[in-house]
Amino acid sequence: MSALPIRIVLVEPSHPGNIGATARAMKNMALRELVLVQPKQFPHAEATARASGADDVLAEARVVGSVAEALEGCGFVAATTSRERDQNFRVLDVRAAAERIVAEARTSPAAVLFGAERTGLTNEEVILADAFLTVPTNPDFSSLNLAQSVAVVAYEWWKGTHDKPEFKVPAKFRRAKAANKEDLIGFFEHIEAELDRTEFLFPADKRAAMVQNMRNMWQRAGLTYQEVQTLRGMVRALTGGKKRKKKDE
């Protein structure tokens, strides 16, 4: 069993066979925490058949209604993508991402987001990620099956931990505990509510794009729990919070 809290999240998987094959790939590499966001068909006989003995992973799988719910308690989140680069996000190849996931999971639960088979992840779902993860493939035939993608990621995390039993967190990843997704979403909603109140998010037809750009900016900052609390305190102070009394008063 994996000693590190690493969560595999499938968003709206449409084929039950892919869910079963994912469970099998996870068990091969000692990953156990599978979360399904609004699966089209689950539980299903085909999922059980394709699991081929990983029935326990399927039995423990959680079904939730949203990506935010699936990521509750998580710090670092990687979202899978076929893009090699993106202007708003760090894009890591699967090996570098596995190293980062292992490092982050030593301080708080980490997760990997896999989008729906045909449509991938939406902009709203991607906003909750800290980095993109990509699997280098043949450019002439780059499409990977969902379960194949999970298997590659799981294999790289396994190599990163079991080929290096004395694995130490790289210095560049050593930092205070990362803010989890509930902390970040709470901060997003807090500052956006105040910006709505002051009519900063104007005009209305531009609001969604402005909010997405701001959330991308905050995600790239890699905020810690304490930094989020400080920012929320700053927002409260700037929007009518009580002034601190001087000691001589």
Image: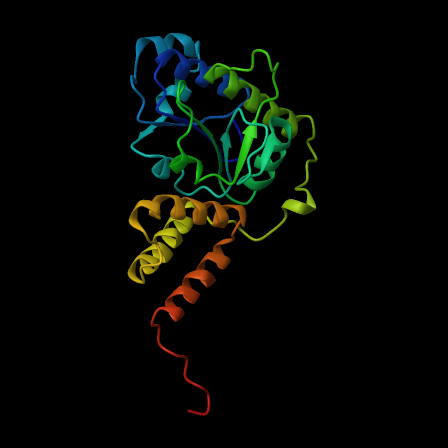
In front: 85, or 132?
Answer: 85
Quarter where residue 60 is shown:
top left
Question: Is 142 positioned to the left or the right of 187 in the image?
Answer: right
Q: How many marks?
A: 0
Q: Which image quarter is the C terminus in?
A: bottom left
Determine the residue positioned at 68% across, 31% down.
Answer: 165
Quarter where residue 135 is shown:
top right
Question: Is 69 positioned to the left or the right of 126 in the image?
Answer: left
Determine the residue positioned at 57% across, 35% down.
Answer: 101
Percent position (x, y) of residue 45? 31, 9
Residue lying at the far bottom of the rendered structure: 248
Determine the residue positioned at 51% across, 15% down.
Answer: 144
Percent position (x, y) of residue 28? 53, 17
In this figure, which colouring scheme has been used for the structure?
Answer: rainbow
Query: Is residue 3 in sight in this rendering?
Result: no
Question: Is 104 positioned to the left or the right of 205 in the image?
Answer: right
Please, is residue 69 above or below residue 140 in the view?
Answer: below
In front: 90, or 20?
Answer: 90
Percent position (x, y) of residue 233? 42, 65
